Image (cartoon, rainbow, N blue to C red):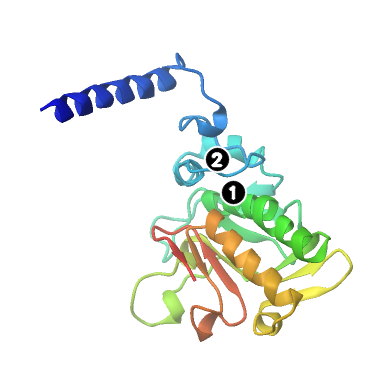
Amino acid sequence: MRFFKALGVLLVLAGGLLVGVWRGWVPLPDDWNPWAPLDVRASPNLLTRLKLGRLQDDPALCDQVLKTSGLRITHQADSPADAACPLRNTLRVQGAEVGLSSSFLASCPLAVAFALFERHSLQPAAQAVFGQAVTRVDHLGSFACRNIYNRADGRLSQHASANALDIAGFRLADGRTINVLKDWPGGGEGAKFLRQVRDGACKDFNVVLSPDYNAAHRNHFHLDMGRWWVCR
């Protein structure tokens, strides 16, 4: 009986604390305030995924967060509702703090996750392994109206909603290129760097598939913001 009374008191206190934070009566740093907008410049924490998840259906909040991202974007018009793969609240990422092999379409969560990845995972890995920055990300695209693995039947790929990006390699400041297909199987610095990048990406994206997953991903990292959490 005492246990349940104590539990009840704790639940009441926790509820009061949440209301206090929500109302602004109890100050919290924005990083740890679940209702504060995500700041890409701040180190990710346990609330980052929660805040990312709110961006898809809140264009105004998306715009606010994008101001901290370092991305250069243009908003895309929503596609017709009867389109085979309708897109809404979609952005074209035209540039980032790191160079891109080309622009790509992205849902707001994917775009912001990419900015988090570049700042907090990719560049630290490059500095740790090579002592220099990554200057360009080479990708294979994001949007493709198709089922997973291009099958005739089955569920739509995250690519069908511009919620996934395939990355094939990176260029370093000294001009060297690190390629997933070529460098992942090796045992040198390239392989070490790519594994650090893969592991770091798992903190920023919901699904990360590398050559360790299957042969279909032997030449790229698949990164998406789907509903599942997978790191392979």
Percent position of residue 166, x then y:
59, 70
Residue type, numbered disc 1: Val
Location of the N terminus (image quadrant): top left
Query: Is residue 43 depicted above or below 5 in this figure?
Result: below
Q: Which residue is mark 2?
A: 62
Residue furthest to the front in view is 2
Look at the image and tell me whether residue 168 can be seen: no
Q: Which residue is mark 1?
A: 112
| Residue 38 falls left or right of residue 87 | right
Residue appearing at x 70%, y 81% in the figure: 183
Which quadrant holds residue 218? bottom right
Q: Nearer the viewer, residue 163 or 30?
A: 30
Residue appearing at x 61%, y 76% in the figure: 220
Q: Nearer the viewer, mark 1 or mark 2?
A: 1
Q: Nearer the viewer, residue 37 or 145?
A: 37
Q: Secondary structure at mark 1?
A: helix
- Rendered image: mark on residue 2: none
Residue type, numbered disc 2: Cys
Crowding at mark 2 (Cα within 10 Å: few <14, some 14-19, many 20+): many
